[in-house]
Image: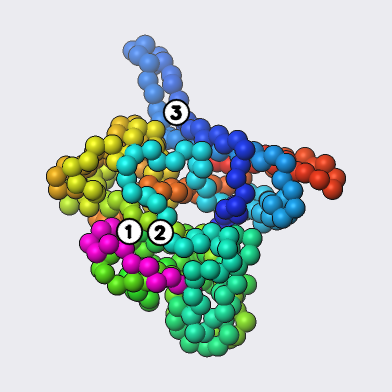
C-alpha cells in the first residue's frame, strides 16, 4: 500500500465534501425514550473533472490506475473551500507544485533532481547521507510553521531514514514510514534557513530514486496540551496571532494529525496568542502531544476510493472523470 496525491495542476470542476454519519437511533422498549448510539463520522468526497485533454488526461488516467482500486490511499483537500479567516496560511515555498520544473529547489550533493507532472524525483548518484532536495527559506523567528511532504513508495520498498525537515534540521526532521506517505515537521522557526527532504540511507547504491508528490511550508497553529491532551471536538491552541477575531471562520476546514475537521465556531485569539478550536467530526486520535500542528492552508485528509471510477472519453479529444472517496 502506498499514499498518492492527485496531480496539483488538475483542478476539479465539481467538488462534494459530505459527512457520512455512523449513528443509530432506536426507541427503548422499556422506557419508550429515543436513544442514539454513535460510531462517529467520516468524510465522503466526490470529484468531477470535465473535458480533460492531453497531458492532464494522461495524468488522471495514470493516477486512477495507481490507486489499484481500494488498495492505495489518497491525500485530498477541498479546493473549493479555502480558509476564509485571517490566519496567515499562504504557501511560502517557491514552485511548491513543480509546475516550473525544478525552479527554486536545490539538489543535494549525492542526488540529481528532476520534475514532471506535478512531482519531483530525487535520484541518487553516489553513496552518502545528506539532503535530497531543499529550499533556502526561513520563517519569522519564533513563529510556528509546518513543513509537509508526501513521499511515494520507492522501488526499494523502504523509505525509513528519509525525513522532512525545517530549520536546517537535516537528520533531526520527521521520518517517513516504510511505505512513504505524509510527514510533517513543525515547530517555531529558529532563524536558520532551509526546508527539505533528507536521506540518512547513506549506503544506498546509485540509481535509487524517490518521488515527492506534495510539499508545503506554511504558518500553522500548535496544540496547547499544557492542561491535558485534547479530545472530542475541541482543542486549545497556542502561538496564534495575538488579539485577533476571526482567524478562522465557522465552516472553514483544518487538518489535525491527518484528520479533516470543519469549524463550527469562529476561532479568536487572546492577548497571549491562545484560542479554542471547536470542530466536527470529533478527533479519532487518542492522544495529541503538545505542539501538534494544526494546518489551515491546504488541510489534507487521507481517503480511499469508494466504488469504481467513471471515465467517459471522446476518442482523440476529451475525457471526463468522476471519482468518489471515503475517509480512510
User: What separation in Å lies between label 2 and label 3 (alpha carbons)?
Assistant: 41 Å
Q: Which residues are magenta?
A: 133-144
Query: Quick one: label 1 or label 3, which is nearer the N terminus?
Result: 3
Examine the residues drawn in magenta and state their main secondary structure: loop
**Residue at the limit of the structure toward the top, as seen here:** 32
Query: Quick one: label 2 or label 1, which is nearer the N terminus?
Result: 2
Name the residue: 25% across, 58% down: 143
- Which dot, 1 or 3, sits closer to the camera? 1
Drawn side of residue 71 relative to residue 149, left or right: right
Quarter of the image for residue 82 reads: top left
User: What separation in Å lies between label 2 and label 1 (alpha carbons)?
Assistant: 10 Å
Quarter of the image for residue 16 reads: top right
Mark 2 crowdedness (10 Å alpha carbons): few <14, some 14-19, many ≥20: some
Q: Which residue is mark 1?
A: 145
Q: Which residue is mark 3?
A: 23
Confirm whether the magenta stretch covers residue 134. Answer: yes
Is residue 224 shown above or below 98?
A: above
Mark 1 crowdedness (10 Å alpha carbons): few <14, some 14-19, many ≥20: many
> Which is more toward the observer, 102 or 47?
102
- For the N terminus, the image quarter is bottom right
- Which dot, 2 or 1, sits closer to the camera? 2
Is residue 51 shown above or below 159?
A: above
Name the residue: 29% across, 34% down: 266
Drawn side of residue 269 relative to residue 78, left or right: left
Question: Circle 3 — which element?
Answer: strand
Mark 3 crowdedness (10 Å alpha carbons): few <14, some 14-19, many ≥20: few
Name the residue: 49% across, 75% down: 106
Amino acid at each position: 500500500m502506498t499514499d498518492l496525491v492527485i496531480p496539483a495542476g488538475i483542478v476539479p470542476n465539481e467538488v462534494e465534501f459530505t459527512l457520512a454519519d455512523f449513528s443509530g437511533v432506536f426507541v427503548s422498549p422499556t422506557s419508550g425514550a429515543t436513544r442514539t448510539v454513535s460510531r462517529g463520522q467520516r468524510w465522503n468526497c466526490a470529484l468531477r473533472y470535465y473535458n480533460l485533454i492531453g497531458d492532464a488526461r494522461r495524468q488522471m488516467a495514470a493516477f486512477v490506475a495507481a490507486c489499484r482500486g481500494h488498495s492505495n490511499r489518497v491525500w485530498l483537500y477541498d479546493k473549493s473551500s479555502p480558509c476564509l479567516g485571517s490566519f496567515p496560511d499562504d504557501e511560502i515555498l517557491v514552485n511548491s507544485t513543480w509546475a516550473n520544473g525544478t525552479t527554486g529547489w536545490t539538489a543535494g550533493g549525492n542526488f540529481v533532481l528532476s520534475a514532471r507532472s506535478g512531482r519531483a524525483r530525487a535520484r541518487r548518484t553516489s553513496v552518502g547521507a545528506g539532503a535530497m532536495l531543499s529550499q533556502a527559506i526561513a520563517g519569522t523567528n519564533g513563529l510556528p510553521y509546518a513543513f509537509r511532504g508526501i513521499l511515494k513508495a520507492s522501488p526499494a520498498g523502504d523509505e525509513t531514514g528519509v525525513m522532512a525537515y525545517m530549520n536546517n534540521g537535516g537528520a533531526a526532521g520527521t521520518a517517513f514510514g516504510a511505505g512513504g506517505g505524509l510527514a510533517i515537521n513543525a515547530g517555531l522557526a529558529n532563524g536558520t534557513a532551509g526546508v527539505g527532504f533528507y536521506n540518512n540511507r547513506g549506503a544506498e547504491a546509485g540509481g535509487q530514486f524517490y518521488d515527492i508528490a506534495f510539499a508545503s511550508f506554511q504558518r500553522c497553529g500548535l496544540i496547547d496540551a499544557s492542561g491535558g491532551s485534547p479530545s472530542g471536538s475541541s482543542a486549545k491552541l497556542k502561538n496564534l496571532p495575538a488579539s485577533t477575531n476571526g482567524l478562522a471562520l465557522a465552516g472553514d476546514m483544518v487538518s489535525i494529525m491527518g484528520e479533516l475537521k470543519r469549524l463550527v465556531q469562529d476561532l479568536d485569539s487572546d492577548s497571549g496568542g491562545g484560542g479554542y478550536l471547536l470542530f466536527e467530526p470529533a478527533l479519532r486520535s487518542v492522544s495529541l502531544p503538545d505542539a501538534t500542528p494544526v494546518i489551515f492552508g491546504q488541510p489534507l485528509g487521507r481517503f480511499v476510493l469508494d466504488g469504481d471510477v467513471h471515465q467517459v472519453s471522446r476518442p482523440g479529444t476529451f475525457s471526463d472523470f468522476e471519482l468518489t472517496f471515503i475517509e480512510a
